[in-house]
Image (cartoon, rainbow, N blue to C red):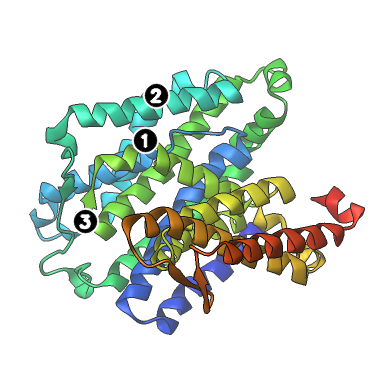
Amino acid sequence: MTPTIKLRWWCMAMAVLPLVFTSSYSTSLMTQMLVGILICLSYQVLLSQGGMLSFGHAIFTGAGSYAVIHGLNTHLFEIGATGWLWVIALPLLGGLTAAAVAAMLGWIATARSGTPFAMITLGLGELVWAAAWMFPDWSGGEAGLSADRTVTDPPFGMSFAQAWHLYALSAVYVLACAWAVVRFTQTPMGLMLRATRDRAVRVAFLGYNPHLIRYIAFIVSAFIAGIAGGLTALNFEFVSVDSFSLQRSGSAMLFTVVGGGALIGGSIIGGVLMVTASVVLSTFTPAWSAYVGLLFIWVVMRWPNGLSGMTPRDVLARANGWGLATAIGTIFLIEMTYHWVTAVAAGMPATLDILMVSVNVSQASHWSLAIAFTAVAYWLASRGRTPSREGRS
């Protein structure tokens, strides 16, 4: 299936989903997923296409968010009869701002590839995060900055006061960026980027500059990340210094790796999982980050190409009852540990309901049963794996 066909199916899905999930919460959740997809797509340009592992990607999403918030606070949409166009174009302002920041920082970062590039981006991310704290008038300091995205007397009733207005705007930007990235990978520049990823020495021998190629890809990735940051600011109408944090950069890297190297499929899986974990799963358990970490470890160890690289045959080959039992036992151990450390230590009851089972974390027998069940299930699941399956993983 070609990327163009995938984009067509993607467009149809985004048009149908708001008709199925009509609540404001569902629409807001889908908008966040679209933004997550855009973040993973921007990271795909660096990682899967250029082989560059960045720990400073939040620089550009944060720059896009701040550009949009400051743009809203200048009330540009109140200027003239076509002022509403400014609100629609504000994510582009975020993208251009992020691209400008990348143009200033990228030449240093892309001078080296591999581990040096990762360490340089890590240092740049921490530098920008610290600098944001030094200018509270611009960044808002601990309180952050807020804005109002609604537009008075807009055409077609698109005031952005309703959740589906912003969903429609996000869908247009995501489709446009996805189409542009697909076309970019098919250009001579995109082909040279993949060649630089695989054989930078040969690219230099042919007369091309690998440093310049990586630098251009760095700016393209930052532009898309800035648009994602701008849409985030429009959605929440708030931005803080945490937008530049290492945690945001790590989240972009983690879910892009989990999604896989498929340009469109990997971005969709990564973006959906990003919001599902941080928004949906976090409402059920405070230990949601532990599950994300375990998922990341499993994908890297068992399926380095990511979830988008798995075929239905691979899923069926790996599916077995003992693997599910191991997952259930792991859930019990994580929830029991977290409840013991946080709730019981604070004087709360020791009983806990996990998957409709009542557990008392103060009783050693419950711990012994959970540990034994998980260990036996893992041992039986490991025995069920054939050498050929292990080799493919």
CB atoms of marks 1 and 3 within 8 Å: no
Question: Which disc is residue 59 wearing?
Answer: 1
Disc 2 target residue: 105
* Dot 1 alpha-carbon crowd within 10 angstroms: few under 14, some 14 to 19, many 20 or more: many
CB atoms of marks 1 and 2 within 8 Å: yes
* Dot 2 alpha-carbon crowd within 10 angstroms: few under 14, some 14 to 19, many 20 or more: some
Q: Classify 296 as above or below 363.
A: above
CB atoms of marks 2 and 3 within 8 Å: no
Residue 213 position, x and y percent, is: 56, 27
Residue 293 position, x and y percent, is: 55, 49
Give the spatial CA distance, label 1 vs label 3: 19 Å
Give the spatial CA distance, label 2 vs label 3: 27 Å
Sequence-wise, the earlier of marks 2 and 3 is 2
Residue 23 found in image quarter:
bottom left
Sequence-wise, the earlier of marks 1 and 2 is 1
Q: Residue furthest right?
A: 387
Disc 3 target residue: 237
Residue shown at 61%/22% (left/top)?
210
Question: Is residue 181 in view?
Answer: no
